[in-house]
Image (cartoon, grey):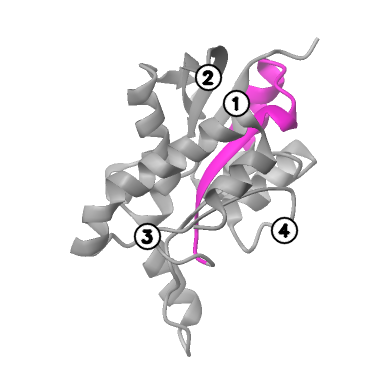
Amino acid sequence: MASDFWLVVGLGNPGKQYEGTRHNMGFMAADVLAERWSVNFSDHKGIAMLGKGVMNLQGKSIKFFLAKPLTYMNESGTAVASISSYYQIPPEHVVVIHDDMDLEFGRIKVKAGGSAGGHNGIKSIDRSLGTNAYARVRLGVGHARRGPNAHDNTVNWVLGGFGPDQRKQLPEFLADGADAAETIIFSGLSRAQEQFNGR
């Protein structure tokens, strides 16, 4: 019997040195949801911080788990697969929030399926779940400089922090990301796409 819970996963890297970096946008959006719905995180098998809560919107109540994998980005799937199999949550009830370099800072794109777009966390989840049929909230962080050191530039970029202007906009951007996850859960993917993808 599949559970009626949803699982919202914010991707990031654990540890002080990664806090506030572009690659941790998913963690930050998960923290917004945790605060919004009074979710307390505790350790799940050493591979994720996991909390449980209830969202009340549009006259409906929906139970959900909120996860921040502790496996480092490239092994995110280990945590997602463990939680979803333990609680019997099907892929169509999974929403993953992550940073995306193909979108400008401040842009959000909601999708399900499709390619991982070079994102190692998403590749890992696709592998571990054996499907890409889960929803994704992609939070734009803009692109690193291309050129001779493109790979190093990319690594430094995603593990870098935000400039002063972006830091000012960040709280609202993260709140929008949290809204997008809620919209998928309450109104469905296509409604969320209408609402967020055109911005």
Q: Which residue is mark 3?
A: 159
Q: Residues within 10 Å of mark 1 (few under 14, many from 20)?
A: some
Name the mark nearer the viewer: 1 or 2: 2
Q: CA distance from mark 2 to mark 3?
A: 37 Å
SS at mark 3 in the image: loop
Residue at x-position 35% and y-position 16%? 38
Q: Residues within 10 Å of mark 4 (few under 14, many from 20)?
A: few
Residues marked 1 and 2 touching at CB (< 8 Å): yes
Task: Tell which circle, 3 or 1, labels the residue nearer the N-terminal end.
Answer: 3
The reply to whether the magenta stretch includes residue 97 is yes
Q: CA distance from mark 3 to mark 1?
A: 33 Å
Residues marked 1 and 4 touching at CB (< 8 Å): no
SS at mark 2 in the image: loop
Task: Check residue 26 in the rendering and tell me which mark sits there, or answer none.
Answer: none
SS at mark 1 in the image: helix
Going by the numbered disc 1, the residue's amino acid type is Phe
Name the mark nearer the viewer: 3 or 1: 1
Which stretch appears magenta?
78-101
Task: Tell which circle, 4 or 2, labels the residue nearer the N-terminal end.
Answer: 2
Residue 66 appears in view: yes
Name the mark nearer the viewer: 1 or 4: 1
SS at mark 4 in the image: loop
The answer to whether 8 is drawn above or below residue 124 in the figure is above
Task: Tell which circle, 3 or 4, labels the residue nearer the N-terminal end.
Answer: 4
Residues marked 2 and 3 touching at CB (< 8 Å): no
In the image, 39 versus 157, the foreground residue is: 39
Task: Check residue 58 in the rendering and tell me which mark sits there, or answer none.
Answer: 2
Q: Which residue is mark 1?
A: 186
